Image (cartoon, rainbow, N blue to C red):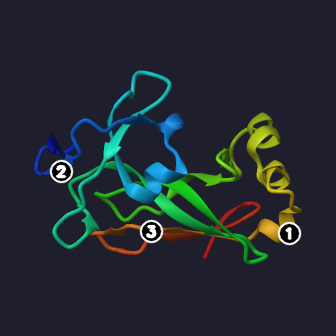
Amino acid sequence: MTRHQSVDGVGSYETRSGVTRNLGELSDDDLRQHPAWAVVGGYEAEDLLLSPLVLDDQGLVPGSVGEVWCLCEAVFADGSQYLATAMCRGDSDCDPVLWSVSNQDTWVPLFLSPPPRFVLRKHGPKVFARRFGRRANSVFPLTMTVVPRFDVEPRVRSIRLDKRGSSA
């Protein structure tokens, strides 16, 4: 185990020694084996360096960890289910952000308004739905539920996304 100091310097958290992946290399199997991955470096590079987060004694993402990439379950409007990942924060109550859904060993990113049009043309809702062989109304609203639970409330993190962004 490797101990890391929390961003605020008050607490600490642990990751598994000797196991790292760049965010772009993270696979379905990696997420199934370790459902939470803490950022341990790579901020200055184009791809973050992650290591499996050691959950606390209650099996929760500790409140001392900042940015953590988590295994999620994505459920499309038509009821189909997929593995997904999203960035969460262990030290706050923020909803999951920066979503990607797995489609046959390929991560399909999803961007919703307000990014610029050129980003939405490449990764927006219509393109996202087509990557799964569906129309947007079969995909949205999409519900993304984070698998690991959190020490900081809400313990269960989930977001419902329509074609324009998040909704209640």
Q: Is residue 23 left or right of residue 52?
A: right
Q: Dot 2 corresponds to which residue? A: 13
Q: Residue at x 43, y 33 (%)?
A: 48
Q: CA distance from mark 1 to mark 3?
A: 25 Å
Q: CA distance from mark 2 to mark 1?
A: 41 Å
| 1 vs 3, front mark | 3
For label 2, count other residues whose C-alpha is less than 10 Å away and answer few (under 14), some (14-19) or many (20+). Answer: many
Q: Is residue 72 left or right of residue 35?
A: right
Q: Dot 1 corresponds to which residue? A: 137
For label 3, count other residues whose C-alpha is less than 10 Å away and answer few (under 14), some (14-19) or many (20+). Answer: some
* Kind of residue sitting beneath label 2: Tyr
Which quadrant, please, contains the N terminus? Answer: top left
* Kind of residue sitting beneath label 1: Asn
- The reply to whether callout 2 and callout 3 are in contact (CB within 8 Å) is no
Near-viewer residue (25 or 141): 25
Q: Dot 3 corresponds to which residue? A: 147
Residue 100 x %, y %: 61, 51
